[in-house]
Image (tube, rainbow, N blue to C red):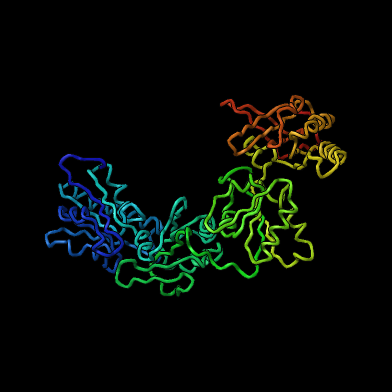
Amino acid sequence: MSGEQSNAGRLYGVGLGPGDPSLMTVRAVEVMAEADVIAYHSARHGRSIARSIAAKHIREDHIEERLVYPVTTETTDHPGGYKGAMEEFYAEASARLAAHLDAGRTVAVLAEGDPMFYGSYMHMHKRLADRYATEVIPGVTSVSAAAARLGTPLAEGEEVLTILPGTLPEEELTARLASTDAAVVMKLGRTFTKVRQAFADSGRLGEARYVERATMAGERLAELADVDAESVPYFSVAVLPSQVDAERPRTPERGEVVVVGTGPAGPLWLTPETRGALAAADDLVGYTTYLDRVPERPGQTRHGSDNRVESERAEFALDLAGRGRRVAVVSGGDPGVFAMATAVLEVASRKEYADVPVRVLPGVTAANAAAARAGAPLGHDYAVLSLSDRLKPWEVIAERLRSAASADLVLALYNPGSRSRTWQVGKARELLLEHRAPDTPVVVARDVGGTGERVRIVRLSDLDPAEVDMRTILLVGSSQTRAVRRGDGEEIAWTPRRYPETGPGPLS
């Protein structure tokens, strides 16, 4: 129920279902019987699908209000363009209905499917519901009807169902299709060629189905890839059904390895491209902690291992791909920054793996994630170094620290400490203090994006090695980096993009 005006009539938004009159609800039929006015939208040719569905329930004594769209797919000379023409139409149509309501008449606005699901009725509702007593009668949607006619589950268990309008840009459609479990794309017609290409580019075309005029005369079901674009009407949908228990598309004779980055933490940090690669994989290979960030999908095999066997993991993934499997090697952060991409490419450079395709997909780096939490400390030139001496001597690390510090670069320091490496942070602080002022801001970011996230800004001289572990990254400012406490008490750090012409100087 919505707003109410005394002595005024009542407004109903009546969902009629997907097209078959027998799928109208009992309540929809009751409301039409009670109504004085039956309103419905139509194109300028005068035919209304909504009216045709409800035709046998419309009486001679009903007042019919035909709400004729001024424009559908054609152009318009309205000074406000398409949007202006439609706004004017909705204002005029709602005024016509308001006149009936003010006269005490009950008005039923018919809507195909469900009134609040991409329905024309909602434009009347937004303009009238705050002034008149209103009730919306839900209807069976075209999405539900399409799944029923296909005879396949739409979404099951923890699968995510995404509903998309085909009018979205092709790249947006591609990204969303790549990253979801199940989907329905509506509003096809002239958008069909673009929609089908989005399915193809997302790697999901082989799974997609097509449903035209579900439950109506002329209903058609087909594989999406087989449909002629010239034959597609507006009232059709593309369906990517549930993948639980579905037969996965045949694994190509030639497999591949895709190295993906999960970002610094969980699903919020995954890119759509990465989600798509993970969904398409037959096998997931990675450090168990990173694999745990990836949703489980039917038909996939997960191969978890210790974090210290990168070469063995890479070789295992390439062997699987050599046997025709699609393999996603899962890495934290960005796979090319102190992570798995190097290990995979190093092994892939061997002669026996020369013909195995390898792709690397980017991810959000720990440095960028920490910088965003702290403000913008990486706003100017910066260097990225690892303090781990497991794969290179400390002497090399120390020399690089001196060089970067003397060049007045902001520093992103990965792998600063662990249970077995406890002295490197203290030594690095000593080296940096030879070139940086004691009050240089240092961002100490631990477990960014995780449940144990803690981000602080401290002075370089106050940096405590005991507070740094393997889940921490350090961002050490340059001479120009500023730390400011704002009115809400939050401290932020930022490095200006403009550098003084006189060169580096002390913080002011």
Residue 164, above or below 431: below
Counting from the top left corner in percent of width and height, residue 132 is at: 23, 43
Q: Quadrant of residue 387?
A: top right
From the viewer's perspective, is 132 left or right of 288? left
Can residue 172 be spotted in the picture? Answer: yes
Is residue 508 visible from the viewing direction of this image? Answer: no
Q: Quadrant of the N terminus?
A: top left
**Whether residue 283 is situated above or below residue 473 in the rendered picture:** below
Q: Quadrant of the C terminus?
A: top right
Instruction: Please name whichever residue, 76 or 348, is drawn nearer the observer in this view of the structure.
Output: 348
Near-viewer residue (407 or 502):
407
In which image quadrant can residue 64 be found? bottom left
Q: Is residue 156 left or right of residue 7?
A: right
Front residue of this view, candidates 429 and 182: 182
Residue 501 spot, x, y in % from top left: 79, 38
Task: Give the x, y percent position of residue 62.
Answer: 14, 58
Could you tell me residue 26's position as x and y percent? Answer: 21, 55
Query: Extreme left residue here?
Result: 61
372 vs 34, left or right, is right
Count of numbered tags? 0
Residue at 20% x, 40% y: name it.
5
37 shown above or below 505 = below
**Residue found at x 64% / y 46%:** 288
